[in-house]
Amino acid sequence: MNPKLVKLIKIVLPLILGVFLIWYSIHSATPEERQKTLEYILQADPKWIILSLTMGILSHLSRAYRWKFLLEPLGYSIKVSNSFMALMIGYLANLGIPRSGEILRGGTISTYEGIPFKKAFGTIISERVIDLLMLLLIIGITLLFQSEYLLTYLQEKIASPFIYLAVLGGLLFAGIIFLRIIKTSKNPILAKLRDFGNGILEGVKTITNIKQKGAFIFHTALIWILYVAMFYVIKFTIPETASLSLGPILATFVAGSFAMTFTNGGIGAFPVAIAAILLLFDIDKPSGEAFGWILWGSQTAINIIIGALSFLFLPIINRER
């Protein structure tokens, strides 16, 4: 298949899926449910939304500051302002092209801080490894406290887990074979890929070489506590969700985290996933979708605003470079 066509499909397909999910969400609801969802959104208490947004911004600042600890072992010291704006530009890019934000973030910090791209990108991969471990930890905690509800949902909505295990096993095996080929190949293209991979590996290894491990762990914990707290305070914007305990909120957090990977910035998928999980806790569809739209809409709006401002001011602040 034409590489350009494949790239176009990767960009357009998630967007089409997001639009379809929005259409499905609207047309599968009764007029009364649509009206109720809209009323919940319009009547949401702004102080809880502002608090959630504040927590979101603080988590971004913490992530930007934490990046310094990953780059220090490589011999680089970056400005927190540049780190923050590169991060927000990356978030903005992800709304247009899924998973492009990490590349743009690495390219931006490379341009304004003089760090080789492959090393900067390697530290971003390191972050993703840590993020995955933290998400798995939260999933484990959620399963521990909400196993009955989640297992019911998985049995009803998801195919046999053995299918996914088989697919993962096959991908792992193929990956091992591919890595062995790259390691020994003399092909120029594969050699460049090997050099690029070694640069990324060097960045990943910085996790073990971090000098300020305590501060790194603190910011990692802070980032994810703030993520969960962003969800938690939004529950107070809707009467039906105000009494939810931490357990259901963790379940919605896990669902929302996965939904963000399906479409551009979670458009369409995020509210649908949140509503589906909250149904397990006897929260009706209008309340669940309103919860999802309030949280997704507010966080996406602030990311667009700060991302656009960062794109504008980053070259101005660094005009001497």
Image (cartoon, rainbow, N blue to C red):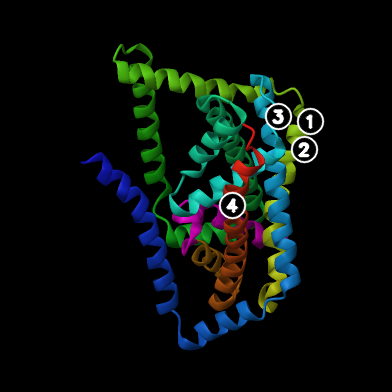
Whether residues under marks 2 and 1 lie with C-beta atoms below 8 angstroms apart, the answer is: yes
96 and 56: which is toward the camera = 96
State the residue at coordinates (58%, 63%).
296
Which residue is more in the foreground, 149 or 227? 227
Q: Which of the 4 image quarters holds residue 262?
A: bottom left
The span from disc 1 to disc 3 (Cα, nearest Å) is 10 Å
| Magenta stretch, residue numbers | 244-269
Do tag 1 and tag 3 residues touch (Cβ < 8 Å)? no
Question: Marks 2 and 4, how far apart in space?
Answer: 25 Å
Tell me how far mark 3 sits from mark 2, CA to CA: 12 Å
Give the residue number, with chain letter if any, for mark 3: 69
Q: Is residue 212 above or below residue 268?
A: above
Q: Nearer the viewer, mark 3 or mark 2?
A: 3
Q: Secondary structure at mark 2?
A: helix
For marks 1 and 4, the one nearer the N-term is: 1
Which numbered disc, 3 or 2, marks the residue that appears first in the sequence? Answer: 3
